[in-house]
Structures are given as structure tokens and as C-alpha cells.
Amino acid sequence: MELSQIGHRFRRVLRTTDGRKVMGTIFSPPTGTPTNANFQAPRRLLKVSANSTLTAGTVIISDSGRFYLCAENGEGEYDGTLYRTFMLIEVPLLVTWGRRATTKDTVTNLDKVTGNTNLGHLRCALEPVGADSDQINVPKAVYRVVTGGAIQAGDLLAGRIVGRVETLLGVQVAEVS
């Protein structure tokens, strides 16, 4: 038996939301990781073969019907790449995604918001980050959104305005309020 074949008997066929099938093994969350203190769902791991077509940002559906977003987690190497792993972030929410449509004002030559363009729906996780305050010190809740969609600052997710957006581990992480 080759080293790259160890653990193949535990692999399952997983579906992606775009209809592809991927072979892999989902592992339980590591013990000892406190998730109740920061109100995040536990992060599972997915192990796939080195030549799998799965990429970060893809959403898979587990056997139990849960949706998970794949984020880069590294490779297993020994005389070459044996397997790839992804951190699985549960994305239970299906939210509307919109972008503000703008045109140039002919008088001021500034961008003017003319409405919202509906870009469809996105699977995402919404996690509380804390509170912030605006210019007149009115507190507002701030959330972290984790998604695989190509969101931009200023977009609307479930009616919330997207602030700063970063790409981390191959997925989009944004602040919304």
C-alpha cells in the first residue's frame, strides 16, 4: 500500500453547490478549540487528493445537508504532495447580494447612486465581531461575513452595507454593519 492511499476507505462523494462531485474525508473539529467564547461555528477539515479540482471559495454540501465553504489549509507532503486540506466554514445563510448602481452627475461630475443591482444570492457565515460607533457616538453592531463570492466594499448583503473586504485563505472576509 502506498502512503498516498492511506485513509481512502473513509472518503465520501461530496457535492458542490454548482453540481460537481468531489471525493474527500470530512474530519471533526479539533478538540480543545473554544468556539462558544467567540460565537463561531466549529471549523472542520476536509482532506482531498492532491489532484482534486476543488478550490478555495467552493461551497460543498455534507451528507447531513449542511453547507460548508472551503478555505485553504495546506498540503500534506512527503516526497511530493500527497493530499490537500481545506478548512470548512459552515455557511448556513443564503442572503441577497446587491451592488449600488451609479452614474456620473452631468453638473457636478460626481458619482450618483441611481439604484441597486441585484447580483443574486450568496452562501455566507455571519459572525459577531463587536460594536462600533458612528460620528455621533451611536453604537452599532459589527459583523464579519465569510463568503466565496467576489464581494466589494459598498455592496449590500442582506440589506447590510459591506465595509472593508479582504481575501484570506482564498475566501472573502468582510465587515458589515
Image (cartoon, rainbow, N blue to C red):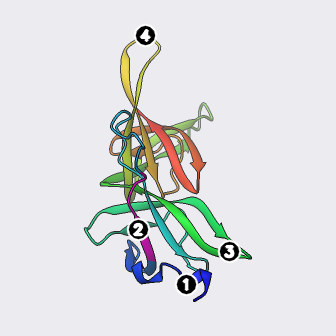
Crowding near pointer 3: few (<14 within 10 Å), some, many (20+)?
A: few
Q: Which mark is residue 81?
A: 3
159 in relation to 96, above or below: above
**Along the polypeptide, which appears first: circle 1 or circle 2?**
1
Q: Nearer the viewer, residue 69 or 38?
A: 38
The quadrant of the picture occupied by the N terminus is bottom right
Secondary structure beneath dot 3 equals strand
Residue that protrudes farthest toward the left in the picture: 64
7 in relation to 65, above or below: below
**Along the polypeptide, which appears first: circle 2 or circle 3?**
2
Region rendered in magenta: 24-30
Q: Pointer 1: what residue?
A: 5
**Along the polypeptide, which appears first: circle 3 or circle 1?**
1
Give how far apart the Cα atoms at labels 1 and 2 are: 16 Å
Q: Nearer the viewer, residue 80 or 56?
A: 80
Secondary structure beneath dot 1 equals helix
Q: Pointer 2: what residue?
A: 26
Residue drawn where x is 42% and y is 11% of the image: 137
Residue drawn where x is 43% and y is 10% of the image: 136
